[in-house]
Structures are given as structure tokens and as C-alpha cells.
Amino acid sequence: MKRTTLAIAIALCALLFAADTANAAGFEVAELSVRQLGNAYAGKAASGSDAAIAFFNPAGMTLFEKSMVSVPIHLLQTRGSWNDDGSTGSPFLGSPPLSGDDGGDPGGFTVIPCMYFIWALNEDFRVGLSINTPYGLTTEYDDDWQGRYNALKSSLVTFNFNPSVAYRIDEMFSVGAGISWMHAEAELTQTVDYGSIAAGAGVPGVAPQGADGFAGIEGDGDAFSWNIGFLIELSENTRFGLAYRSRIMVNIEGDAEFDVPASAAPITGGGSFVDTKGATRLKLPDQLYLSFFTKVAEDWDVMADITWTGWSYFEEIRITYDNPNQPVTVMPEDWNDVLRYSVGANWRPREDLTVRIGMAYDESPIPSSTRTPRIPTNDRFWFALGVSWQIDEMMSADFAWMHVFIEDGDIDQDVVTGQNLQGKFEGSADVFGLQFNISF
């Protein structure tokens, strides 16, 4: 029975991970547990409510007397709109108003799957496995929108495989640790004003207009990281969790494509803007979780969480090319370290039913000076509700919904060919989640 359940779960997970992920604050994917979603992830490293604790804080696995499998599926709907505020076109044409539409809605629907396992080997020792997508990004605009020279498609898909172990030292202290293998696939595309490039370089016979083309890079890579956690149980009803996840640097290697129109073909004479191999380093931040959980009455729990994320590690996107004639592409980011604050509560109106509520304030790491249409987000406020149903002794199910209010994101960005994109993005998001848990 155990082997069959595990085989079915892994097969389902492999199928679901074909879907793209979508960005949270920065491009972290916060939607990793439906049961935790109902509390806006308050207490995630201390509550021990489902097997996702193997990811958030491996030490918390000692809270489980039985083995457990949790399979969450999230449906994320993001909405966004661009409002222009004086964008200008090529300076070679006198910087006229920038042509193009609002780009449509860069968001949409995204499926975010996860899977977690906890094996209770004996009274004090636990082994866990987390399979999820902790980072992701998907934004895509119409080909003829105003910001086409800044961004068309931006996509990051990650697959994280994180085995972990936990040991209960005594009645008060537990410790846990794990190692992660992450696979990442990335794609960046945009329109390029090859006419203005030619005019700036003094290439004869190329007009500084009507010579738009395409540029993009697509690749993948792998990296390893580690995590560690501690659980302090002050009493049977009150505990703290502290967990740390290390930085990750993924070397992305792939193919760079340049589509130069015939009218601008002379600019390729020097060997640049031709298809080649390319590479970049994707720097993902470290994180520190501090969580609190307490049972204040027979039918009430309250919890809180502070999450620190070291986004200052994400300084730039630097793309190098095998073609020695192709200049390095540098996109400054200069992000900031940020905090997320969460509070939540559980109410059990009857033995087999738990109602969850949570709120969070999620700081954006992106300074206004480097905000781009690729990730136009800003500070966020979360409001979440959830319900958990204990079906029988082995099975339980969770449903949760969260609405994300996003502050408007101002953009004032120049590109190398002189166009200036100026305006703001408005956005919001809703997350719906369904999760099944099996204890055995």
C-alpha cells in the first residue's frame, strides 16, 4: 500500500511539473502548501500542520508520530495592466510619443504543484522529501505593445528536489537539515530597434526606423543548496521554529537568437547579432524563517511568522555570448533584502473541521529605479481563508483562497536604443488551492 501510494504520487508530480510557475514578490513562489495558504503562511516553520514542514523547517518533522504525504495543487490567477505616462520613442526620430498598445494582461492562470513526504522511522528520527517550485516567473506581452523594447516574454521554471532528516534531541529541542537539487529553465525575449543601433553606429544605408527585429535567449541549468532548521517546544501547546535556506547560483546555458530584418542586415557585417550560444548566472537568495505557534484554547490556535529574504544577492542579469563579436548584455537589478510579516488563526468548530484565516504584508525587493516590465510588482498585502476536513483516520483535505493586493509599480526605464518607457503597472492576484493528505 505504501509503495503504491508513493509511486502514484511521484508520477502525478512529474506530470504536473510540466506547467509553468508564476511570480510572487520578486519571483519567489510562495504558494507551496494549501493548508499553510489558509493562514497566509503564518507559523509555517512551527505549526507542523502538514508534511510541507519538511521544506519550511525540517526539524518540525518530529511533530508527526505517523508518516504523511501531502499533495497540494494551487491555481494562481494574476491580473495586470499598463498605464502610460509619457513614454518616448527613438531619439534618432526626435523622441516622439512611443507607439504601441498597453500590451494586454501579462498575467493569466498558472498551476503550481508540490509534493511532500515524511517518514517516521522511529520515535526520534524522521526522513523527509520536498518536491516543489520555490521560484518562478511568467510575464508575456503583445508583440506591438509600448514596452516591447524592454520585454516581451520572461519565463523562469524551477524544479526543486529536497531530501531532509530530523532528530528529536529531547522533549524541547529538535534539529533538521536537508540538501536541494534545483533545475531551472529560463527564457527572455524582446523587440530590438536595429535601425537605431545602426544609426548610432554610423552604418550606412540603414534608416533609423522600420527596422525592428527580435532578440531572445533560452537555456537551463542545475545547482545545489542546503537548509537547516530548529524547533523549540516550550510546552505541548507552544513552540517556535527557526529555519534557514542557503543561496543558490544556477549557471544557465543555452541559445541566443537574433532576428535582424533585411533592411538592417548591414549591421551583422561585423559578426554581431547572429545566433550563438549564451550563458548567465541566476542568483537566488537565502532565506530565514522565524515562526511561532500556540494553542490558546481547545478550539483555537494563533500563529505568526517573519520571513527574511536576501534579495540583495540579485544584483544584475549579465548575459555573455560565445560569439566574441557580440557585446555582453547587462541588466542592472540591485534588489533589496526584504521582510514578510504574517499572522493567522485556526478555529475548530467541530472535531473534523478546521477554519483558517491569515494576513500578511510582503515587501517587494525591487527598487523603483530598476523596476522593469519583466517583473513589475511592488509591495503586497495578502488576505487568506481556508478550511481543513479530516475525512477519516488516514485522509484529510484542504481548500484555501488568498487574494493579493499589489501596490502600483512605477516604471521609468531607458533601453540602449534610447526609447523611454514611463508609466505604471496595476495588478492583483487570487490563489485557489486544493490539497490531500494521507497519514499511515
Image (cartoon, rainbow, N blue to C red):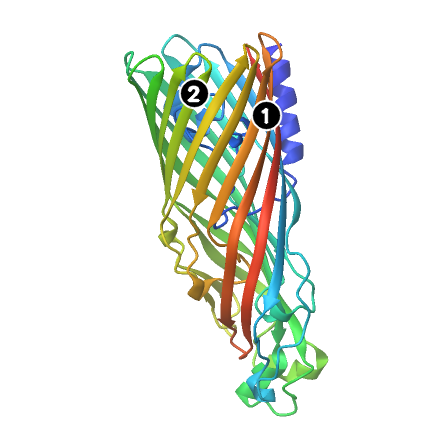
Q: Which quadrant of the rendered structure holds the N terminus?
A: top right
Density class for disc 2 (Cα within 10 Å; few <14, some 14-19, many ≥20) is some
Residue 71 tag number: 1
The amino acid pointed to by label 2 is Asp
Q: Residues within 10 Å of mark 1 (few under 14, many from 20)?
A: many
- The residue under label 2 is 301
Q: Image height check: is 148 above or below 361?
A: below
Nearest the camera: 226 or 238?
238
Disc 1 versus disc 2: distance between alpha carbons?
23 Å
21 lies above or below 376: above
Residue 126: image location, x then y, percent: 41, 16
Tell me: 202 left or right of 4. left
The answer to which image quadrant residue 58 occupies is: top left
Q: Is residue 256 visible?
A: no
Inspect this view and state whether residue 290 appears: yes
Callout 1: helix, strand or loop?
strand
- Whole-percent x, y for residue 397 in the image: 61, 20
Quadrant housing residue 124? top left
Residue in the picture at 34% in, 18% down? 238
Of marks 1 and 2, the one in the foreground: 2
Q: Residue furthest toward the bottom?
A: 204
**What amino acid does circle 1 point to?**
Val
